[in-house]
Image (spheres, rainbow, N blue to C red):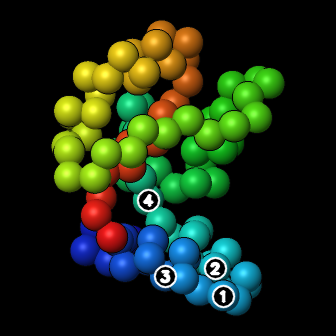
């Protein structure tokens, strides 16, 4: 999905009451992370470390991915080999 429509899809996934449609939209959404650009949620979950049972993310709308990567939170999780989603897109 193009970056242009990604934010619209995120909003649609949140506001859609129909669970079936919500799942379809969610499969199209992409996020940047500390390890990859434009990763989908399914691909992100597939890469979880053994025993990981929660998603890691850092949200700060309006900041660049590079700015978020400077966070101590990101540094510590990167050192442990964990992927962290960077949520910085305005919706």
**Label 4 Cα crowd, 10 Å radius (few <14 / some 14-19 / many 20+):** many
Q: Position of residue 52 (x, y in %)?
A: 73, 28
Residue 86 in the image: above or below residue 8:
above
Residue 43 in the image: above or below residue 80:
below
* Residue denoted by label 1: 17
Q: Quadrant of residue 49?
A: top right
**Label 1 Cα crowd, 10 Å radius (few <14 / some 14-19 / many 20+):** few
Of residues 44 and 71, the one nearer the viewer is 71
Q: Which mark is residue 30?
A: 4
SS class, disc 1: loop
Q: Position of residue 91 (x, y in %)?
A: 33, 70
Q: Are marks 4 and 1 in contact (CB under 8 Å)?
A: no
Residue 40 in the image: above or below residue 5:
above
Residue at image point 28% right, 64% down: 90
Of residues 31 and 14, the one nearer the viewer is 14
* Residue denoted by label 2: 22
Q: Quadrant of the N terminus?
A: bottom left
Q: Which mark is residue 35?
A: none
SS class, disc 3: helix
Q: CA distance from mark 4 to mark 1?
A: 21 Å
Say if residue 2 shows up in the picture. no
């Amino acid at each position: 999905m193009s970056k242009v429509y990604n934010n619209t899809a995120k909003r649609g996934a949140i506001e859609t009451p129909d669970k079936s449609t919500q799942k379809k939209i969610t499969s199209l959404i992409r996020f940047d992370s500390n390890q990859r650009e434009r990763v989908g949620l399914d691909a992100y979950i597939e890469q979880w470390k053994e025993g990981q049972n929660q998603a890691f993310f850092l949200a700060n709308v309006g900041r660049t991915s590079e700015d978020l990567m400077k966070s101590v939170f990101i540094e510590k999780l990167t050192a442990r080999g964990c992927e962290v989603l960077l949520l910085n897109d305005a919706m």
